[in-house]
Image: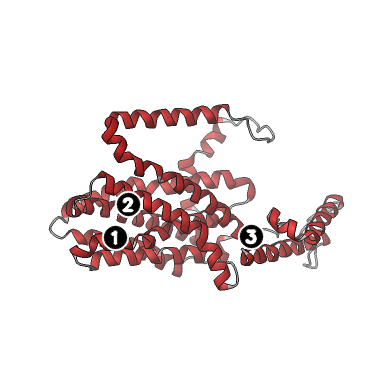
Amino acid sequence: SGGRGRAFSRLDSIMLYVACIGPLFSGPLVAAVGYAGVWALAAGMYAVAALLFATAPPSPQPAAPRASLGGWVHSFTPLLLLRLVSERRGQLLGLVLAFLLATGGVQAGVQGFVLYAQRYLGWGQDMLGLFSALFSALGATLILFVHPIACRLLGSAPSDLSMVRASYLLPLAYFAALAALPTAATEAAALGGLPLLAAGACALPHFRALFSDSRPAQAQGEQMAVVAALESLPMLYATPLVSLAFERLLDAPRLIFLLPLGTVGAAILLLLAAVRPAALLLDEPPRQRWPSQAVLVRAPDLARRLTDSVVCNAAEPEGGSAYGSPDGRLKPRAAREAAASREAEAAEQEDCLGA
């Protein structure tokens, strides 16, 4: 799962770096061409993106059989989400609830601070755009570098669940400081402590890796669609709830920061008490894991042994179950795959520590 977490981290960091552009230039663009011009520019960019996707060459893959109406309904994302929540796997349900609480809490905290800054700090669109751009840039940078630094400091790669737990402790400190400090120090604390808030972004790729590990390879597409739906849910309830709460707390506006403090704190407690990494994994036989190309280049002997293992596996007849025998021992094919997987994990661990 560590490899999946690193892959999702690279993707998320690219997306956050790109997300810096809009908030940074929205203020000057509104001043230059007005809101209608900005909306027209956004529509044009979406049209260009749609055209690029439509004209891109398809990825090489076997043609999928034509799905029936029942198959389409069965793969409908809301139904997949409902099925995920209704599964009788308490650990997975705990992970879903923690995900919704944590992401919704952070989003509510950011939205609450934006409302507070507009009304009580006098921030305009330029300052709010700069705040959003810095938040995205810091989040992308922390996603790229926190995990490799943690590997070097700890001597081993931290698990995805450990990364999620640790990442949300820092936004918790950020909102606690905003709620406790006097009004005169709020602006300095909000800007100076922005890395604490942005550190919450480090949890997202590892959250996705945990969800990915709970499904087999052939169900990864559906699972990522469910995760995308989960990520969109906080936008449906966090912003309206914060706006309603802020309107009711005009006499004591700093209490708005207790809302994200409570929800993110509840998510951390749930992750500590109710979620165990081993219970999230599928009970599957060992699968061959391949290290990165850089590891194989530095360790040609490992690459040769892995290739030999694949050749032997292809030549060996199945003859019943490939992973077990009546006496409970692994068959030679499974033993080779398990040994190759352990070597690949060890090589990736060395690559992580050497990064």
* Image height of 310 relative to 173, above or below: above
* Dot 3 crowding, Cα within 10 Å, few <14, some 14–19, many 20+: few
Q: Position of residue 47 (x, y in %)?
A: 45, 27
* Dot 1 crowding, Cα within 10 Å, few <14, some 14–19, many 20+: some
Residue 44 location, quadrant? top left
Residues tagged 2 and 3 counted as in contact (Cβ below 8 A):
no
Q: Position of residue 291 (x, y in %)?
A: 69, 57
Q: Residue at x 47, y 62 (%)?
A: 164
Residues tagged 2 and 1 counted as in contact (Cβ below 8 A):
yes
Q: Residue at x 85, y 54 (%)?
A: 312
Residue 177 location, quadrant? bottom left
| Disc 1 target residue | 190
Please identify, in this view, whether the residue under mark 3 or under mark 1 is nearer the observer: 1
- 336 or 294, which lies in front? 294
* Residue 89 visible in rendering: no
* Image height of 347 relative to 136, above or below: below
- 107 or 135, which lies in front? 135
Q: Amino acid at mark 1?
A: Ala
* Image height of 71 relative to 248, above or below: above
